[in-house]
Every structure is written in structure tokens, then in C-alpha cells.
Image (cartoon, helix red, strand yellow):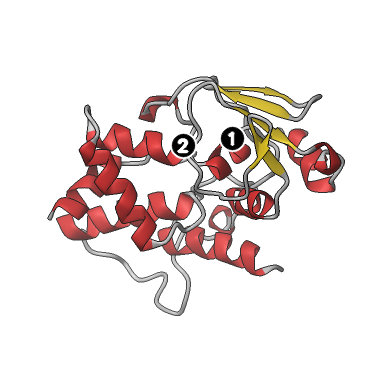
Amino acid sequence: MTKRHEAKYKIDRRLGQNIWGRPKSPVNRREYGPGQHGQRRKGKPSDFGTQLRAKQKLKGYYGSISEKQFRRYYAEAIRLKGDSGENLIGLLERRLDAVIYRAKFVATVFAARQFVNHGHVTVNGKRVNISSYQVKPGDVIAVKESSRQLAIVIEAAALAERDVPDYIEADHNKSTATFTRTPTLTDVPYAVQMEPNLVIEFYSR
């Protein structure tokens, strides 16, 4: 098993939730946490604990974004007009690796980050290898022609476990996707409930 698979499964086990809705998640077999104390009965979490868990879940979902980078998203979210929690979700969904994952060009968000970093992706015809690149509405994202026959691309397009959301128009015959608009929380097809308002509260303490 690769380190990336291990990291993905550890996040699920630690949080006790199948946050990507993957059929092979270990939480499907064991809902308790890892380690010898994983099955202990847990008391009611504090407000801080609830907020921390919400932050860990959202960070983990997008491929375990670093704390420094995640805090920058928070700072940008509260700077923008409107609901800060919704702004945070919009910023995360505009990440290039998130768009590649949502368009079903690869199977996981971890694979999407690696795919972008290895130079397989273009935005509006120009190669972009920064996974945190912020996509804008109207941008056309494409898999490089020389990368379209890679096994991970072909296999991901055939996945039945998730659909492409309506804020992305994907053409798998051409391996292109258009980011049509910045989504709201209710638009994003999370497998579990995300609580960005608690993340904002965590950083606002």
C-alpha cells in the first residue's frame, strides 16, 4: 500500500467517518478510531473539540492541506464579502487539484495533487503545476494530450461512486472541464456533513 493510500485511510480512521465516500474505506468495517484505545466510549466534546474536529475534517478532505495554507484560506474567506463559511468552501473548491478531482480525471484528491504537480494539466491552454492554483469561473482545465491515455485517467472516468457536480462541465472524450461558477456549501457533493462555520469559529477564537 502506498503512503498516499495509508494517509487517506488514516484520516478516515482518525475521524471515524468515510469522508470521501470510498467503498474501500476502513470505516466501512470499523467505525471506531485506530489504536488500542480506539473503542473507548467518548464523552461529549467541548466546543473547542467540535470546532477542531470540523477543521481537521475539512483539511483532510482536500488532501491534508498544511496548517499555514489553510489559515491563509481562512484569512481570505473573512476578507471577502458575504458568509465567511461559504467563502471558505468556494476557495477550497477553486483549487486546481479539487477541480481535477471533481471532474473525475483522477480517482482521489491525493492523486489529483500529484497529477497537477507532475505537469499533466493545463488551464486555458497553459501548463499549470501548482495544485493550489485558484481556478476562476470560465476557466477551461484540460489533461495534456500526452497524458490522456494514462491508466489513472481512464479508470477514474469510469468510476460509478461519484458524479461530476453541476458547477463543472466535463467532457471525458476530450479530457477537458470548464469551471462554470464558484459553488456554495449545498452545491458541493460531500460524502459527510462539513461545517465550515465551525472552522471560522475555531480560527476566530
- Return the residue found at the far front: 126
Q: On the rendered structure, is 52 left or right of 90?
A: left
Percent x, y of residue 24: 65, 53
Query: From what the image shows, is residue 1 above or below residue 179?
Result: below
Query: From what the image shows, is residue 171 above or below residue 110?
Result: above
Percent x, y of residue 101: 61, 40
Residue 40 bears which disc, if any? none
Q: Nearer the viewer, residue 28 or 163?
A: 163
- Return the residue found at the far bottom: 36
Q: On the rendered structure, is 113 left or right of 17?
A: right
Q: Earlier in the sequence, mark 2 or mark 1?
A: 2
Residue under pointer 1: 102
Mark 2 and mark 1 in contact? Answer it, CB < 8 Å.
yes
Q: Nearer the viewer, residue 185 or 80?
A: 80
Question: Element at badge 1?
Answer: helix
- The residue drawn where x is 47% and y is 77% is 35
- The residue drawn where x is 54% and y is 19% is 166
**Alpha carbon of mark 2 to alpha carbon of mark 1: how far?**
9 Å
Q: Quadrant of the N terminus?
A: bottom right
Check disc 1 and give the amino acid type: Arg
- The residue drawn where x is 45% and y is 80% is 36
Question: Element at badge 2?
Answer: helix
Check disc 2 and give the amino acid type: Glu
Displayed quadrant of residue 37: bottom left
Residue under pointer 2: 93
